[in-house]
Image: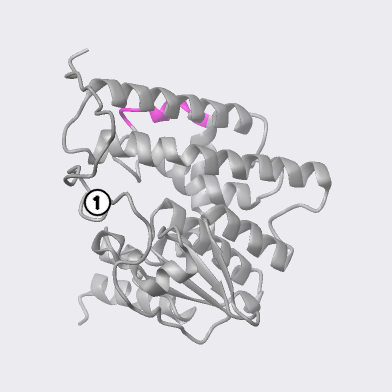
């Protein structure tokens, strides 16, 4: 092992930025850094987010509900630029004291209900609209098993593997090996489950799929961290089959675009305030392809 040795101090102190991606916004204290109210649109739900895997979970759920014709799930999606520290505004902290995206306000209630943590938002919407969460006790429990499995595993995939493999300013063997081993174990857990089930929790498409797909589906299809080859992702054949099948769902295709501020221009929809926003995006793409201005 080539990593240099480090002796932790008796009491850790925050003396300088750690370096790497997001180092300018990482800090060991909570609370707002500045006063700023959040914008509020016309729809029942106000979403403050970014199209990271955790953010995409919620936009997929909302788009799936709208796909079913549930107009009460209409929403405004406001872009939160986490690399600029917008999640530390006083308005955002009021909705999510943990200062993480996504955060949701249900303005159909009086007073408005705040919902934070992506898994909690999925569960809230599933229960409110009675969709994507089975009523049968055994199937419901299996769905929640996998929902909480993902919530408990995300720190290893994103904060662990993603940080040390993709974002850390220096590459060290020990943390990369440690988190790669765990991520591959998790992929194997999921692959074994999907070997005997069309969807994660069984034969029904549920909030468990919506929670897991933006992370593990993106890993095996090389959409996050550019790590599919490194992880030998093609060997997880059942995860890959599931990931590619879900990718064809129109609601997932729309949900991936919302609050996306990187990648190909046609894949980005900074904010979403009406269903027609997607239509305008398609028209813009077609106009560009034909050379129209």
Q: Nearer the viewer, residue 102 or 236?
A: 102
Q: Which residue is mark 1?
A: 22
Seen as rendered, the residue at the extreme front is 10
Q: Nearer the viewer, residue 184 or 7?
A: 7
User: Is residue 175 visible in this depiction of the protein?
Assistant: yes
Magenta-drawn stretch contains 235: yes
SS for dot 1: loop
Name the quarter where the C terminus is drawn.
Answer: bottom left
Q: Nearer the viewer, residue 217 or 44?
A: 44
| Residue 12 to residue 282: above or below | above
Magenta-drawn stretch contains 182: no
Indicate the position of residue 230 as horizontal and vertical percent values.
Answer: 31, 28
Q: Residue at x 20, y 75 (%)?
A: 291
Tell whether 262 sits left or right of 189.
Answer: left
Indicate the position of residue 210 as horizontal and vertical percent values.
Answer: 56, 52
Q: How many marks?
A: 1
Tell whether 241 sits left or right of 145.
Answer: left
Q: Residue at x 19, y 18 (%)?
A: 5
Indicate the position of residue 111 as horizontal and vertical percent values.
Answer: 62, 81
Name the quarter where the N terminus is drawn.
Answer: top left
User: Is residue 245 visible in this depiction of the protein?
Assistant: no
Q: Which residues are magenta?
A: 229-237
Q: Residue at x 33, y 78 (%)?
A: 36
């Amino acid at each position: 092992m080539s990593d240099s040795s480090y002796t932790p101090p008796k009491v850790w102190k925050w003396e300088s930025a750690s370096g790497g991606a997001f180092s300018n916004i990482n800090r060991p204290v909570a609370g707002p850094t500045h006063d700023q109210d959040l914008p509020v649109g016309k729809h029942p739900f106000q979403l403050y987010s970014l199209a990271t895997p955790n953010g995409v979970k919620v936009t997929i759920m909302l788009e799936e509900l709208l796909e079913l014709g549930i107009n009460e799930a209409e929403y405004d999606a406001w872009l939160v630029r986490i690399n600029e520290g917008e999640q530390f505004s006083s308005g955002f902290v009021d909705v999510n004291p943990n200062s993480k995206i996504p955060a949701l306000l249900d303005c159909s209630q009086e007073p408005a209900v705040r919902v934070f943590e992506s898994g909690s938002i999925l569960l809230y919407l599933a229960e409110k609209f009675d969709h994507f969460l089975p009523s049968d006790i055994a199937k419901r429990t299996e769905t929640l098993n996998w929902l909480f499995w993902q919530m408990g595993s995300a720190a290893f995939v994103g904060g662990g593997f993603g940080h040390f493999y993709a974002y850390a300013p220096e590459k060290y063997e020990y943390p990369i090996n440690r988190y790669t081993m765990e991520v591959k174990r998790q992929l194997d857990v999921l692959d074994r489950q999907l070997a005997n089930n069309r969807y994660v929790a069984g034969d029904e498409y549920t909030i468990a799929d919506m929670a897991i797909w933006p992370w593990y589906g993106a890993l095996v299809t090389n959409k996050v961290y550019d790590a599919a080859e490194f992880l030998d992702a093609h060997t997880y054949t059942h995860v890959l089959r599931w990931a590619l099948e879900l990718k064809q769902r129109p609601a997932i295709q729309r949900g991936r675009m919302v609050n996306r501020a990187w990648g190909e221009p046609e894949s980005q929809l900074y904010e979403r305030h009406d269903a027609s926003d997607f239509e305008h995006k398609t028209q813009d793409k077609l106009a560009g392809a034909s050379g129209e201005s």
